[in-house]
Image (cartoon, helix red, strand yellow):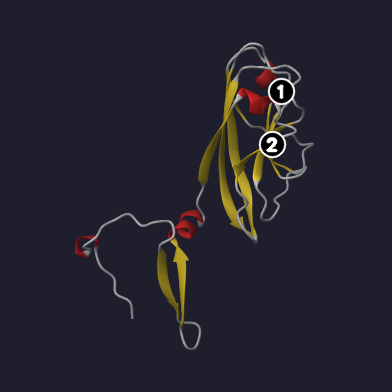
């Protein structure tokens, strides 16, 4: 049988690594089966996660032909559900002529929403929240990365930059 200790009883109070394991005993099996969960797995169980991605002018110019990954594929039997997103665009002349900034899973499935086309070609710095277009297909795809892309590449060389923020959770299908 395992032992538990209070924090004051621990000699080494180091922060656990993501690969450290918490061992459990499953008493519903005969004989009881030992199982474990890693600290990394514990951090994603029912947790809302946040991430951000900085985009250079060169990346914004080619967002359609070269999408940029913002969240890695979560593994078999799991999917990424986007809760919200926003983009902080810092203008630099000349403006881009890309269309919408879109967050999607690999391929053509729009999952995270879009930012209005005026953000990239507005001629000003803009901080905008993602919105959902009722014409978009919103679908969760198992074990697929989340990407930032645009509906078209820019034909002008804008000099602005952007930071994309995504709030999401990993769900088990």
Residue 162 at x, y percent in the picture:
58, 25
SS of the residue under disc 2: loop
Please state which of the two labelled residues, at mark 2 or mark 1, is closer to the viewer.
Answer: 2
Quote the CA–CA distance across marks 2 and 1: 17 Å
The quarter of the picture where the N terminus appears is: bottom left
Front residue of 29 and 162 = 162
The reply to whether residue 88 is visible in this rendering is no
Residue 117: assigned label: 1
Which quadrant of the view contains residue 125?
top right
Front residue of 81 and 16 = 16
Q: Is residue 169 left or right of residue 9?
A: right
SS of the residue under disc 1: loop
Q: How many labels, in total?
A: 2
Q: Is residue 142 left or right of residue 44?
A: right
Q: Is residue 172 above or below residue 98?
A: below
Front residue of 77 and 128 = 77
Q: Is residue 88 above or below residue 134?
A: above
The quarter of the picture where the C terminus appears is: bottom right
Residue 130 at x, y percent in the picture:
63, 32
Circle 2 residue: 67
The reply to whether residue 68 is visible in this rendering is yes
């Amino acid at each position: 049988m395992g032992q538990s200790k209070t924090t004051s009883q621990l000699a080494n109070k180091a922060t656990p690594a993501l690969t450290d394991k918490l061992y459990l005993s499953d008493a519903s099996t005969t004989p009881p089966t030992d199982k474990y969960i890693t600290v990394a797995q514990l951090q994603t169980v029912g947790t809302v996660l946040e991430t951000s991605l900085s985009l250079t002018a060169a990346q914004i110019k080619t967002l359609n032909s070269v999408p940029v990954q913002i969240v890695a594929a979560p593994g078999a039997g799991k999917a990424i559900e986007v809760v919200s997103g926003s983009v902080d665009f810092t203008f630099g002349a000349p403006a881009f002529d890309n269309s919408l900034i879109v967050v999607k899973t690999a391929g053509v499935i729009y999952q995270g929403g879009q930012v209005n086309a005026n953000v990239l070609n507005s001629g000003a710095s803009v901080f905008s929240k993602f919105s959902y277009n009722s014409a978009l297909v919103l679908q969760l795809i198992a074990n697929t990365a989340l990407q930032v892309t645009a509906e078209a590449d820019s034909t002008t060389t804008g000099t602005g930059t952007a930071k994309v923020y995504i709030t999401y959770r990993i769900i088990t299908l």
